[in-house]
Amino acid sequence: MRKYELVYVLKPNTEEEKRNSVLEKVKSIVAVNGQVDKVDEWGTRKLAYPIAKLTEGYYVLVNFTSDVEQPKEIDRNLKISEDVIRHMIVNIEE
């Protein structure tokens, strides 16, 4: 089991219901063979540079522990989601 950190940015006008559904989807994928350690919603912040003509985004940080297959599945699902602007999964070395 490895520790990972996921940060994803949603479109700023995304409804709370859709934000929660993206988070629940990530949690359910991790729960297959791991656990979510911490979820930190940063809220709406200004982007460093415009992405698809958007200047703000809703940031969410998720720390989780899982095997090496779960990040690949999370990555695949976040790429498909039309509400996600950007995401990054990083392995935390201890």
Image: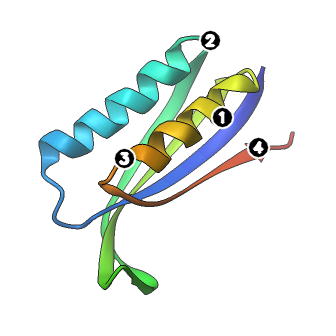
The residue carrying mark 3 is 81
Q: Residue at x 78, y 28 (%)?
A: 2
For the residues labelled 4 and 1, the Cα–Cα distance comes to: 12 Å
| Mark 3 or 2, nearer chain start | 2
Horizontal placement of 28 versus 3: left or right? left
Q: Residue at x 44, y 31 (%)?
A: 26
Type of amino acid under label 3: Ser
Q: Secondary structure at mark 4?
A: strand
Q: Secondary structure at mark 3?
A: loop
For the residues labelled 1 and 3, the Cα–Cα distance comes to: 15 Å
The residue carrying mark 4 is 91
Q: Secondary structure at mark 1?
A: helix
Horizontal placement of 85 versus 44: left or right? right
**Quarter residue 1 falls in:** top right
Q: Nearer the viewer, mark 4 or mark 3?
A: 3
Cβ–Cβ under 8 Å for marks 1 and 3: no
The correct choice, above or below, for 62 with respect to 85 in the image is above
Horizontal placement of 80 versus 65: left or right? left
Q: Nearer the viewer, mark 3 or mark 2?
A: 3
Cβ–Cβ under 8 Å for marks 4 and 2: no
Type of amino acid under label 1: Lys
The residue carrying mark 1 is 72
| Mark 1 or 3, nearer chain start | 1
Q: Which is nearer the eye, 65 or 8?
A: 8
Cβ–Cβ under 8 Å for marks 4 and 1: no
The residue carrying mark 2 is 33
Q: Residues within 10 Å of mark 2 (few under 14, many from 20)?
A: some
Cβ–Cβ under 8 Å for marks 4 and 3: no
Image spot of residue 71 (x, y percent): 64, 34
Q: Secondary structure at mark 2?
A: loop
Count of numbered tags: 4
